Amino acid sequence: MKSRRLPPLTAIRAFDAVARHASFKLAAEEIGVTPTAISHQIRVLEESLGQRLFIRSARSVALTPAGEILFRASGNIFATLREAVDTLSGADRSAAMTLSTTSNFLTNWLVPRLPQLNAELPELELRLHSGTELVDVRGDKADCAIRYSMRPDDTLDNTLLYEDRFVLIASPTLGIKQPKDLIGQTLFHIENRLIPTHEPSWQHWKDAFGPDELLVKSGLHFDDEMHAIQAAIAGQGVLLASELLVQHALAQKLLHIALPGSLPGGKYYFVTSPDKAGRDNITAFKRWLQQAFRDAER
């Protein structure tokens, strides 16, 4: 027996939208066409099937028994299609890798090394997310993160990348050669440093290295370490900075470590969820990070 041709998919889509919303107007808004176009598609479908599918009144739209049968089928069809699209979209997302980190780390450490990363991992599709909030790497927003903390999160897959320290940096133009040269310099302070504990403050520096006359509460206060680094490059003052975040400026001789000594910092970890840890792009990126950190310490 020869099977009948199926009605046009566009007509079935219009029917399914009207049946779900019980409204031609709302179905038109969902699909992005006019109510007149929806009515035309329903008429085409009813003529194709030789059945009335809706009972229409001035205030409501209801399914006929034939419409009920078709709606059960269309619901299954479009649910299956949506599931397939979601699966394909998920596969596409897994080919890419979203990294979450702070804007300070991104700007001062990763961005200068992106040409090297692209050369060594040309097939890596990297997406970058920056912010101060902790993004859940178990979900869809990020696949992995570089986090700065005092200790690892035992619920995640953690790789220690770097143990930070804070050094006294300044522009070479300031001519600081010994502790007493800090007298009269503008001290830069960073507000709201939550990590590390204890805070690498000028009071801690004075207690450890002097000079005794240093006025530790004087100077300028910044709420963003990047701004303080830029001000230090301009020769406007001195800063106790994360050595990692000023590596690029030190290499370019825009800044130098003005005096010996350091204060302890936090630790940089590469983290991902246990179920994502085995993905090829994540393991390749982790190996690249580990090598890049080793190279920077030489």
Image (spheres, rainbow, N blue to C red):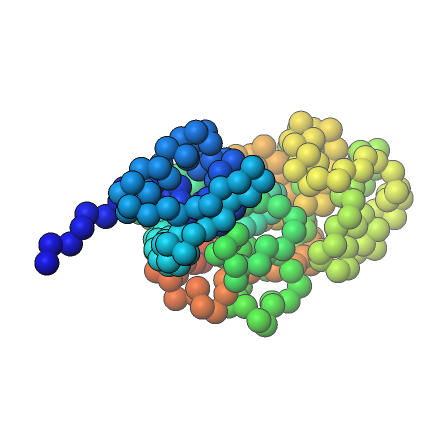
**At 41% from the left edge and 35% from the top edge, which residue is drawn?**
38
Residue 148 falls left or right of residue 174: left
Q: Position of residue 60 (x, y in %)?
A: 55, 43
Please say whether residue 164 is visible from this viewpoint.
no
130 or 250, nearer to the observer: 130
Q: Give above or below for 130 relative to 275.
A: above
**At 65% from the left edge and 51% from the top edge, which residue is drawn?**
133
The single residue placed furthest to the bottom in the displayed view is 154
Q: Position of residue 70 (x, y in %)?
A: 36, 54
Q: Position of residue 185 (x, y in %)?
A: 80, 34
Q: Give above or below for 148 relative to 231.
A: below
Numbered label tally: 0
> Which image quadrant for residue 253?
top right
Please say whether residue 227 is visible from this viewpoint.
yes
23 or 183, nearer to the observer: 23
101 or 7, nearer to the observer: 7
Residue 32 falls left or right of residue 156: left
> Which image quadrant for residue 240?
top right
**At 71% from the left edge and 56% from the top edge, which residue is drawn?**
195
> Which image quadrant for residue 286?
bottom left
3 or 10, nearer to the observer: 3
Q: Position of residue 102 (x, y in %)?
A: 60, 47
Position of the N terminus, as image quadrant, is: bottom left
Q: Give above or below for 108 relative to 254.
A: below
**At 83% from the left edge and 36% from the top edge, which residue is drawn?**
219
Residue 5 falls left or right of residue 242: left
